[in-house]
Image (spheres, rainbow, N blue to C red):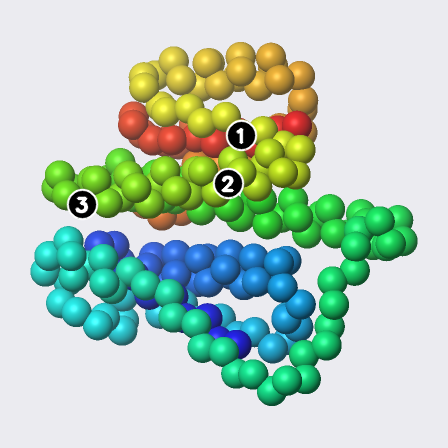
Amino acid sequence: MIVEVHTDNQSTESFNIQMSMARAKTIMDHIIKYTNINPENIEIYGYGDTRPIAPNDTPENMQKNRRVEITIFYSGTETDAKVPVENLESKDVERANLIELNELIELVQYAAVKYDIYFRVKGKRLKELAKIDADEAEYLAKSRAKKSGYKIIKRVVTNETFMYELLSLIRDLNNTDVWKRIYSAWNGQLVEPSKLHRGQAVFVLYK
């Protein structure tokens, strides 16, 4: 199986490639989790905006370029089966939980970057499309978090007192480990909340 992800040209080429690879990996993780396909038989590629199928001159054409292409090669020899978690040894369960947490963190990071794009993009129609993408990413992250026993809080930087509000929020959560699970983005890169500008989103992942 080959998973290829493409974007429009609304950011830099390197950022678009990074985002398309992140989405390709998320798709691969879902395939691995919910099917019996051997991970060794999956290849992922993130092309960013380097292979458009339409000019990036209208919102409709840009939407065409934001696409996922999956090619399946079937040989009839796939026999791997999922092993129920309850049948795994304790170390295997711990490893499975860690993998699940890492997948959740990637989804939260993805949502942070999507909201960064939404806050920065210009134009009413592009704003609408970017908001849809951001909301979908947030919904996906929160759904996975709920399934994994975690919670997600999203806050938007509104003024210079934001960091004090965030500190208070974390103290209320009473979980020092939450410091490791704060995700936000600026110009497509994950950054510390203190480096954000007004209007940016911060996600806090906690139990």
The residue to which callout 1 is attached is 152
Looking at the rendering, which quadrant does residue 202 occupy?
top left
Q: Earlier in the sequence, mark 3 or mark 1?
A: 3
Q: Is residue 10 above or below residue 143?
A: below
Q: Is residue 180 left or right of residue 185?
A: right
Taking the view exactly as shown, the residue that stands out farthest to the front is: 76
Q: Is residue 146 above or below residue 97?
A: above
The residue to which callout 2 is attached is 141
- Please state the horizontal and vertical placement of residue 20, each as a whole percent of the image: 39, 61
- Please state the horizontal and vertical placement of residue 203, each as a whole percent of the image: 48, 31
Q: Nearer the viewer, residue 151 or 77?
A: 77
Is the Cβ of the residue at disc 1 closer than 8 Å to that at disc 2? yes
- Please state the horizontal and vertical placement of residue 110, each as a whole percent of the image: 44, 46
Separation of disc 1 and disc 2 at Cα? 8 Å
Separation of disc 3 and disc 1 at Cα? 26 Å
Residue at (50, 26) in percent of width and height: 153
Separation of disc 2 and disc 3 at Cα? 23 Å
Q: Which of 159 and 105 is in front in this view?
A: 105
